Each structure stands twice: as structure tokens, then as C-alpha cells.
Image: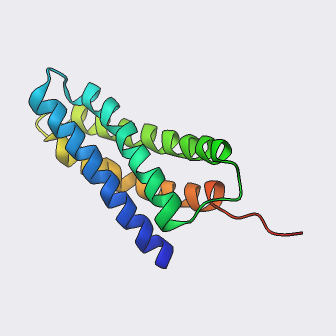
Amino acid sequence: MKKLFRFLIAGGVGFVVDAGVLHLLLWFTPFGPFVGRAISIPSALLATWVLNRNFTFGRSDRSLAAEGFRYGSVGLTSALLNYALFSSLLMTEPSLRPIIALTLASAAATAFSFFGYSRFVFRHRQNS
């Protein structure tokens, strides 16, 4: 339960980074919500990796490169799910504010991310 709580904190920080970058891009650039989100997602992914690695799960037994690859694989899959839901919501309901679509899509991708990170990325190998 402690890891889930810490994961939600790290995810909350990632959400703030994602939403903050998206908001700044929408406010200060000509980018729309789709391009803006393609930029904000990697920013959030980097922030959550640092937090999950040092605060939530601890470093894995793998090399930094292997851990990073695994984290990126789960993160990219989760981000694609998140982005697909985000895009679908905005295309289905054009009057929906992008921040609402972001919130709903992020909530839906959270369970997938926790399972993937805890089981595939940061799971410590058992000693034989």
C-alpha cells in the first residue's frame, strides 16, 4: 500500500508537469492540444522516472540503460493509451476542455502504469 501511495504522489507530480507544459504550450505557442500533448508527455515521463526510481520503488537490479529501456517501454505504452484516450475524448466531444480530457485519460492509464512499473521495471530479481 505504501508503494501505491508513493506511486500516486509521483504520478501527481507527473500530472502537474504534463498539465503545466501543455498549458504553457497552449498559451504561449501556436501549438494545438495534440502537438502540445506530444511534447508534454515525455516531460512528465522523465519526471516520473526520476521519482519512481528514487522515491517509489527504488532502483532496480538492472543497469541504468536496461532499467531506462524498460521504464520507457512501459511509459510509452501507457502514454500511447493515455494519448489515444485524450484524442478520442477531444474528437468525440470538441467542446471538452483539454485539461478535462487530460485528467480523464491520465486516470485511465494509471492502473496500467503501476502494474507495468512494479512488475516489469522495478521488480527485484530473486536470489537463486
Q: Residue at x 27, y 28 (%)?
A: 34
Q: Is residue 117 left or right of residue 96?
A: right
Q: Nearer the viewer, residue 85 or 123?
A: 123
In this picture, is 34 found above or below 72?
A: above
Is any part of residue 1 visible from this angle? Answer: no
Q: Is residue 111 left or right of residue 100?
A: right
Counting from the top left corner in percent of width and height, residue 94 is at 15, 33
The count of marks equals 0
Counting from the top left corner in percent of width and height, residue 75 is at 50, 44
Q: Residue at x 37, y 58 (%)?
A: 11
Counting from the top left corner in percent of width and height, residue 111 is at 46, 60
Q: Quadrant of the C terminus?
A: bottom right
Is any part of residue 104 visible from this angle? Answer: yes
Q: Residue at the right extreme?
A: 128
Q: Residue at x 25, y 52 (%)?
A: 16
Q: Residue at x 42, y 57 (%)?
A: 110
Which quadrant of the structure image shows residue 118? bottom right
Q: Is residue 3 left or right of residue 70?
A: left
Counting from the top left corner in percent of width and height, residue 98 is at 18, 40
What kind of colouring is applied to the model shown? rainbow
Q: Residue at the top extreme?
A: 30
In this picture, is 119 found above or below 46?
A: below
In this picture, is 128 found above or below 11?
A: below
Q: Nearer the viewer, residue 86 or 114?
A: 114
